[in-house]
Image (cartoon, rainbow, N blue to C red):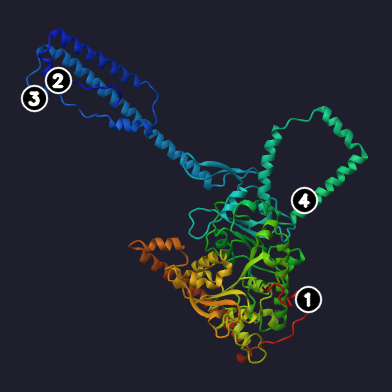
């Protein structure tokens, strides 16, 4: 209630007034009437005041009693004096007007509160639309909101992926290098995210090529430059005449020409480097990974692995061996037409097969669909595999040499899948010393097989003190120990080549070479593309590897305290359990099939476990994934049958072992371990 507001006297007070003298009673009633008139005028004035905010007025309005007040003269006791009837009528009239004024005030504020609520809903709707839509295609940066919702939401200029980009006529390896940027890098660069991770509600990541990132940043800077230029005043005529006079001087002109040439050279050298990543130095990323894709390019599981690693806060740099222009010599070896930059609203579902390329592979060094032909021309394929390795190792050296200094200072990881994993395994990284923090080798067994021309090529070619993680499935159709191309070729009775005692993983090689730290994860029922069966396991594995690479061999002990993770691994072999201790820390873990769906995030799985019908949802998802895996295995079996039919035992041409030819890089291979501590 407002200060100073009093209500009419009750029945007992009126009874006390009956014995008063008439003059005294009249004076008291007149004073009371004056007080009520002042309060009534005050309330009427409130109706003409600006409406107050709902947050401050609503508690006061709710506290005001709007229920009818009982007539105090109807209380028990003697009837009031007849002379007071007129005063009573005046009091009741004032009271009625007071109630009407308060009710009118409440109605006004209710309408204001309703209008305010509708306005805030419309405001939030506009903000959400600005945050999700890329807006019209303009050269300048689109205005996209960032930060928390509500009135405190901040507005930041973010360049849209719809900005017009000029396609390069002859892009280089650096230009076409793929980048997978974590959320912190996207915010730092001020670009629109165009990718999410599995289970995300909104897009926070960005992927594209180096030249596309340069184009977006140039569009942003050009827009800012136009604003600055618009504010600049024209040069006075006096200054223009002075410049013309200076330019007419041959010495000054020659100096300016040399300066322009230096600047042009610096710009060209910058273009041939990864200096576009220099701005990410202070955005607090977890680290960097140089990734080597498989023989089909950076698609399917290659893309998924880069994607999940980026969500962990890592910058992923992946040279693309298929993006060379078809008219170049490299493009004639391998080429795929590339897709344009994905927009903010494009479909980039996690389980989409290929988000990078618009055509199938072509070129002399393409063999992604020719594994079953290795029987017909074994010597040709051995030379092809060696040529591909030399090509891929050259790409890694070329990109590492052009990394920004802050990445070299911080250190980086190496990683690869399939052909890229073979490249990382054989890669001689000794020249980079302790800049290499760790390496992971996915879907390759690190053994002498049809994929490696000589027994020495089936070993680790780099530093032996770099923590190494090997991931491979028990049903890998190319390098597995049970039924694979490598197994069929090695067991050919005529001229088979490769390790006869194939184990399907790198544990034996790591122990023989005495690596300091190594972990081998063998995935039950895992094929060459492991995400369908073990996607959620890979996420937890990489989370630990990129955080504590030196202790990766102790993974089973570290996970033993977690009720969910400890059931995901079983120790099969370990150097610490052997009678003759080798002086190295290497362990092989068996990873059973996942007890939960892999097409759901672990967050979704955990949430479903906590609700009544969640078990039914998980069971349905597991059945659906089982059908997908069943179809995948059927296709793999058909391909292996085609390879098996070509062996000499089955009437085919068999395999032929030949001595590998020396090449330009023959002397570059590791001959002795230099950095083993």
Q: Is residue 248 above or below residue 331?
A: above
Q: Please give the residue where the numbered disc 1 appears in the rendered image.
A: 667
Quadrant where the C terminus lies?
bottom right
Q: Would residue 322 be visible to someone looking at this image?
A: yes
Element class at badge 3: loop
Determine the residue located farthest toward the left in the rendered image: 78
Q: Dot 2, how many residues are within 10 Å of its Cα: few (below 14), some (14-19), or many (20+)?
A: few
Give the quarter of the image for residue 674.
bottom right
Dividing the picture into quadrants, the one containing residue 232 is top right
Q: Which residue is mark 2?
A: 13
* Residue at 83% from the left image edge and 30% from the top image edge: 239
C-alpha span from label 4 to label 1: 35 Å
Which x, y percent locates residue 214? 68, 51
Q: Which residue is mark 3?
A: 76
**Marks 2 and 3, Cα distance to the nearest angstrom?**
12 Å
Real-space Cα separation, disc 4 to disc 2, in angstroms: 96 Å
Q: First in sequence: mark 3 or mark 1?
A: 3
Tell me how far mark 3 sits from mark 4, CA to CA: 100 Å
x, y percentage for residue 654? 66, 88
Quadrant in which the N terminus is drawn: top left
Across and down, in percent, residue 640 comes to: 57, 81
Q: Is residue 377 visible?
A: no
Q: Dividing the picture into quarters, in which one does residue 612 lie?
A: bottom left
Most foreground residue, 151 or 132: 151
- Helix, strand or loop at label 1? It is helix
Residue at the spot of label 4: 267
Q: Are marks 3 and 4 in contact (CB under 8 Å)?
A: no
Viewer-side residue, 62 vs 608: 62
The residue positioned farthest toward the top in the image shown: 23
**Decide: marks 4, 1 in contact (CB < 8 A)?**
no
Q: In the drawing, does residue 358 fall left or right of residue 604? A: right
Mark toward the start of the polypeptide (3 vs 4): 3
């Amino acid at each position: 209630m407002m200060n100073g507001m009093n209500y009419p006297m009750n029945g007992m007070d009126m009874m006390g007034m009956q014995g008063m003298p008439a003059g005294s009673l009249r004076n008291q009633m007149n004073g009371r009437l004056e007080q009520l008139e002042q309060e009534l005028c005050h309330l009427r004035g409130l109706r003409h005041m600006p409406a107050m905010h709902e947050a401050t007025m609503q508690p006061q309005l709710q506290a005001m009693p709007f229920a009818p007040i009982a007539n105090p003269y109807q209380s028990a006791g003697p009837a009031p004096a007849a002379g007071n009837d007129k005063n009573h009528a005046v009091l009741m009239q004032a009271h009625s007007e007071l109630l009407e004024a308060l009710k009118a005030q409440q109605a006004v504020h209710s309408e204001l509160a309703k209008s305010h609520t509708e306005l805030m809903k419309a405001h939030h709707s506009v903000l959400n639309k600005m945050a999700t839509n890329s807006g019209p295609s303009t050269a300048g940066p689109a205005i996209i909101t960032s930060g928390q919702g509500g009135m405190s939401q901040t507005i930041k200029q973010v360049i849209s992926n719809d900005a017009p980009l000029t396609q390069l006529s002859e892009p280089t390896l650096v230009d076409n290098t793929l980048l997978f940027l974590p959320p912190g890098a996207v915010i730092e660069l001020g670009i629109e995210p165009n990718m999410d991770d599995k289970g995300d509600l909104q897009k926070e990541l960005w992927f594209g090529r180096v030249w596309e990132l340069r184009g977006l940043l140039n569009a942003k800077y050009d827009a800012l430059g136009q604003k600055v230029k618009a504010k600049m005043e024209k040069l006075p005529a006096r200054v223009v005449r002075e410049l013309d006079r200076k330019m007419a001087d041959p010495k000054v002109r020659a100096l300016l020409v040399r300066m322009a040439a230096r600047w042009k050279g610096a710009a060209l050298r910058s273009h041939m480097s990864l200096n576009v990543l220099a701005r990410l130095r202070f955005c607090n990323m977890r680290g960097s990974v140089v990734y080597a894709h498989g023989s089909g390019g950076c698609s399917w599981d290659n893309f998924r692995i880069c994607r999940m690693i980026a969500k962990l806060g890592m910058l992923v740099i992946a040279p693309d061996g298929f993006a060379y222009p078809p008219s170049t010599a490299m493009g004639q070896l391998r080429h795929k037409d590339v897709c344009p930059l994905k927009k903010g609203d494009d479909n980039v579902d996690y389980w989409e097969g290929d988000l990078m390329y618009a055509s199938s592979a072509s070129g002399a060094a393409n063999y992604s669909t020719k594994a079953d032909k290795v029987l017909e021309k074994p010597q040709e394929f051995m030379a092809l595999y060696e040529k591909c390795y030399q090509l891929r190792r050259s790409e890694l050296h070329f990109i590492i040499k052009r990394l920004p200094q802050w990445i070299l200072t911080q250190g980086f990881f190496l990683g690869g899948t399939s052909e890229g994993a073979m490249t990382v395994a054989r890669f001689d990284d000794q020249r980079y010393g302790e800049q290499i923090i760790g390496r992971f080798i996915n879907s390759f067994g690190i053994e002498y097989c049809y994929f490696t021309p000589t027994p020495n090529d089936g070993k680790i070619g780099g530093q032996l003190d770099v923590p190494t993680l090997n991931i491979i499935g028990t049903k890998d159709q190319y390098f597995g120990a049970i039924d694979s191309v490598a197994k069929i070729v090695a067991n050919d009775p005529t001229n088979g080549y490769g390790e006869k005692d194939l184990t399907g993983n790198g544990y034996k090689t790591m122990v023989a070479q005495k690596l300091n730290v190594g972990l081998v994860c063998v995935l039950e029922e895992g094929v060459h593309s492991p995400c369908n069966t073990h996607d959620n396991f890979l996420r937890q594995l990489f989370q630990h590897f990129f955080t504590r690479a030196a202790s990766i061999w102790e993974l089973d002990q570290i996970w033993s305290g977690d009720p969910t993770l400890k059931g995901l691994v079983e120790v099969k072999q370990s150097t610490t359990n052997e009678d003759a201790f080798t002086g190295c820390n290497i362990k092989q873990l068996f990873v059973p099939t996942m007890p939960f769906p892999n097409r759901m995030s672990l967050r979704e799985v955990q949430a479903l476990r906590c609700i009544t019908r969640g078990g039914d949802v998980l069971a349905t998802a597991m059945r659906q994934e089982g059908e997908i895996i069943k179809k995948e295995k059927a296709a793999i079996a058909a391909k292996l049958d085609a390879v098996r039919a070509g062996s000499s035992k089955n009437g085919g041409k068999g395999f032929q072992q030949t001595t590998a030819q020396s090449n330009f890089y023959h002397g570059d291979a590791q001959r002795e371990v230099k950095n083993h501590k």
